[in-house]
Image (cartoon, rainbow, N blue to C red):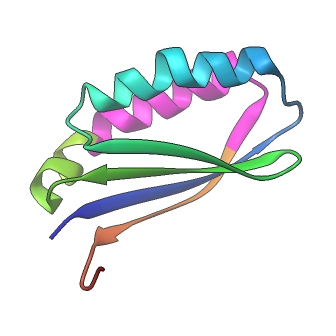
Amino acid sequence: MAYFSVSHWDTTDWTDDMEALARDKYVPMVMNLGAESVDMIRTGKHNFVVVTKYTDATKGEAAQARIEKIRDQAAEEMPMKMTGVHRGSTFANG
């Protein structure tokens, strides 16, 4: 079954430049680590979640150490911090 990572983020600002940086730099970085998809979803004025899908747990878990470095880099480059992360394999889908 597929493996997902869902990270929750808060930011003190939201700009078009930040969206472009996320889309043009960070999504490709994560995709290059074996992700099947990466969705960044704005959930509030200064909040968003990142949902990353891998084909299976082996690929998803193998990427996590490198993902941590990408998250640290993003938090240094933009005014944001990760507030939580959840990971796991699907047990049902439709």
Q: Quadrant of the N terminus?
A: bottom left
**What are the residue bounds of the magenta stretch?**
64-81
Give the image location of residue 65, x and y in percent. Answer: 30, 39
Chief SS of the magenta region: helix
Give the image location of residue 76, x and y in percent. Answer: 65, 21
Lateral position of residue 10 relative to residue 60, left or right: right
Q: Residue at x 34, y 43 (%)?
A: 37
Q: Residue at x 54, y 29 (%)?
A: 72
Nearest the eye: 4 or 20: 20
Is 59 a magenta residue?
Answer: no
Is 67 a magenta residue?
Answer: yes
Q: Quadrant of the C terminus?
A: bottom left
**The quadrant where residue 80 appears:** top right
Nearest the eye: 66 or 2: 2
Nearest the eye: 90 or 67: 90
- Residue, far bottom: 92
- Residue, far front: 94
* In the image, residue 85 above or below residue 63: below
Give the image location of residue 16, x and y in percent. Answer: 78, 19
Q: Residue at x 89, y 35 (%)?
A: 12
